[in-house]
Image (tube, grey):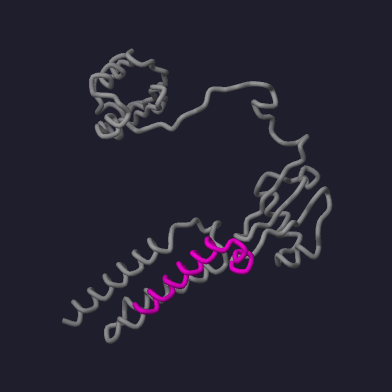
Amino acid sequence: MEFLKLCLTVLGSFGTLFFAAKFIGHKQIAQLDFFDYITGITVGSIAAEMATELEEPWKPLTAIVIYGGVTLLLSAVSNKFPRSRKYLNGTPTILMDRGKLYYENLKKAKLDLSEFMVMCRQQGYFDLTGIQTAVFEYNGKLTILPVSGRRPVTPEDMNLAPEQELLFTELIMDGRVLEDNLKRMGLDLTWLDKQLNQRGIKSPKDVFLAVCDRNLKFVLYEKSSSEAKAAGAQPGC
């Protein structure tokens, strides 16, 4: 009986943590502000306590609900009143601009020069003279605007107009045809079989992955080879 109660409590803790995470929202670690980070740690600790609390599990459950509710409330406030964001989330800080490092702003961001240099190198800037402006964002990431003469050349700089790339949709995965995706693309099995036959593939089971975009560019990877076979297919072909 005691073991069953423990199992139910653990499952309840897992379910509560799962729904709390869903309500609070998904963010990458690098996107979390300080408050979100602390809230995540606290909610996780409370959930761990709830998993072993057999006598009064409703107490940690209530704490998780309150933490989740406060987080949602603060998120709603920051969305409704943009001016409150600088008090709740903080503001970006310029650490370097036009070749000048701002010592006071580094202190404000609680960074030393070594940490700043590491963050620059992580983004590929080993030479600080290649940096026009460096901004320390409120989520702890460093954003860098390079000097114009050292930034990568873009097609626009060369007066080129490359064709816009489109998202690919998976049609075959591990030998299995994804018919729902095929229909969503406005295609059918006859079209797919034709594409496979043109590439000497006898069955979808011989395909590890096949994808297609809205321009009907069809790319497949055979199971027997790591080499990709890519070809652009025109409508009706």
Q: Is residue 111 above or below residue 198?
A: below
Quarter of the image with the C terminus is top left
Say which of 79 and 175 sits in front: 79
Instruction: Look at 75% across and 63% down and name the residue there.
Output: 106
Along the viewing direction, whichever of 10 and 85 lies nearer the viewer:
85
Q: Is residue 81 magenta?
A: yes
In-image side of 201 versus 31 (left or right) = left
Q: Residue at x 28, y 29 (%)?
A: 182
- Magenta span of residues: 61-88
Residue at coordinates 83% horizontally, 49% vertically from top-left? 99
Q: Quadrant of residue 101?
A: bottom right
Q: Is residue 82 left or right of residue 218?
A: right
Q: Residue at x 44, y 32 (%)?
A: 167
Viewer can see residue 176: no
Residue furthest left in the image: 1
Residue lying furthest bottom: 55
Q: Residue furthest front?
A: 80
Q: Is residue 111 above or below residue 161?
A: below
Q: Position of residue 109 (x, y in %)?
A: 70, 65
Query: Does residue 49 appear to the left or right of 38 in the view shown?
Result: left
Position of residue 22 measured from the top left corner of the image (x, y, whole percent): 38, 61
In which quadrant of the rendered image does the N terminus lie?
A: bottom left
- Magenta stretch, main secondary structure class: helix
Residue 67 place in picture, x, y as percent:
44, 74
Residue 48 visible, this orientation: yes
Q: Quadrant of residue 155?
A: top right
Q: Position of residue 54 (x, y in %)?
A: 27, 83
Quarter of the image for residue 20 reads bottom left
Q: Is residue 164 left or right of residue 146?
A: left
Task: Look at the image and say whether residue 163 sits in the magenta stretch.
Answer: no
